[in-house]
Each structure stands twice: as C-alpha cells, then as structure tokens.
Image (cartoon, rainbow, N blue to C red):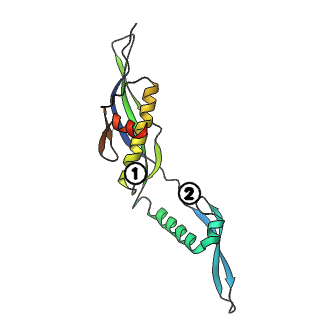
Amino acid sequence: MWMEPIKLIKISTERVEDDLYFDDLITKYDPVYEYDVNDNKIQVGLKIIDSCQYSQEDADKDWRQVLTWIKEDEHRMDCYGRDWYMFGIRAVATLHFPMRTTESSIIQKIKSPGIYGMESDSDGGFFKLEEMAEVSILLDMLESMRVDTPDNFMCALVVSDDCMTVGEIKKRFH
C-alpha cells in the first residue's frame, strides 16, 4: 500500500532556558607575597590552584593581567540575572506523518540538539549564525528521514527575529 510522504509544515528556532554553569568562570588562587626590607608584605604573583581559563604559566608571565581577568570574571558572575543571562537555541521542525491504516495523521515536532551557554549580551549577528547552524543540523536530520525540504521553504529565526529560506541556509552550511 502506498503511503504519503512525511510533509514539512514549519521550521523555526526557539530560545531555551539554560542554567548557568559557573565552573569555567571560577578561578581559585592564592596571592604570592614577599617582604621588603622594611618587613612590608608585597604581592609579587599568583598561585593558580584551580582554573578552567588560566594556567600557572599565564600567571607567571603576567600575574597582574591574570588577576584583572579573574576580577572581571567575578564581576560578570555577580551581574548574572540582572545584566545578562544564558540561554540555548534549538531548531524545530513541525512534521505531518500520514497514517497507513486510517485517514488520521500525526503532527510531530523534531528538534535539533541545540547549542547552549549563549550569553544574552552577545552580538546579535552571533545569535543568527548559531540559529542558522542549528537549522542546518535539523535539515540534515530531516534529510535522513527522507523529508522533502524545498529550497524556497521559509525558516523563522525567532531569536534574531529574522527569516531565511532553506536554500540560503544550505548554501551557507553545506
């Protein structure tokens, strides 16, 4: 019995809540002191205890710069939730699955894996690029399911408030 193919109804992106994972911003360190001839304690370096961003080699090269970066990271963490937040982006396809045994059909959504850790105060062009990448991944998923994705089919890029055709996205990523 012949069955209708799966039909593409809609492609769009969505913003996904993302919990902040601070571990990559937290640097544990100890200041390194020496004493001058008058017995005054003077900081002369940093000992990096635990960091995903800075190595002891970085601190040995320019501990003042590394300390500045650490303080900026701490300030950034303090501003989380007020000045900025993190979110993820996924692409979503709405599909029509015809049923072989009845006249009914199933409407189902398929989602790309998504990219997370997007900082809300990043450049808007960055969001659009990531949305396009997620749509490209979704198009690959749909192709593996043998879903027809015409080049002139419009995709709604919700986060960057834009629209693009499947053909434009394929041209950029395939």
Which residue is denoted by mark 1 in the rendering?
A: 126
Classify residue 126 as left or right of residue 22: left
Q: State how many labels appear.
A: 2
**Residue 137: which quarter of the image?**
top left
Query: Which is more toward the observer, 153 or 38?
Result: 153
Q: Is residue 100 above or below residue 34?
A: above
Indicate the quadrant containing the N terminus: top left, top right, bottom left or bottom right. top left
Q: Residue at x 70, y 91 (%)?
A: 37
Badge 2 crowding class, 10 Å Cα cut-off, few under 14, some 14 to 19, many 20 or more, is few
Residue 148 as seen in the image, left or right of residue 39: left
| Residue pointed to by mark 2 | 24
Compared across the picture, whether 64 is left or right of 75 comes to right
Q: CA distance from mark 1 to mark 2?
A: 21 Å
Q: Is residue 31 above or below residue 26?
A: below
The residue under label 2 is which amino acid type?
Asp
> Considering the numbered disc 2 on the image, is that residue within a helix, a strand or a loop?
helix
Mark yes or no: residue 126 visible: yes
Q: Nearer the viewer, residue 156 or 125?
A: 125
Task: Name the residue rendered at 51%, 65% in the picture.
Answer: 73
Residue 111 at least partly seen: no
Label 1: element kind:
helix
| Mark positioned earlier in the residue sequence (1 or 2) | 2
Mark 1 closeness class: few <14, some 14–19, many ≥20 residues within 10 Å: few
Horizontal and vertical percent position of residue 156:
31, 39
For the C terminus, the image quarter is top left
Q: Is the residue 75 above or below the residue 45 in the image?
A: above
Q: Judge by depth and name the residue closer to the eye, 9 or 18.
A: 9
Q: Label 1 sits on what residue type?
A: Phe
| Residue at (31% x, 39% y) in the render | 164
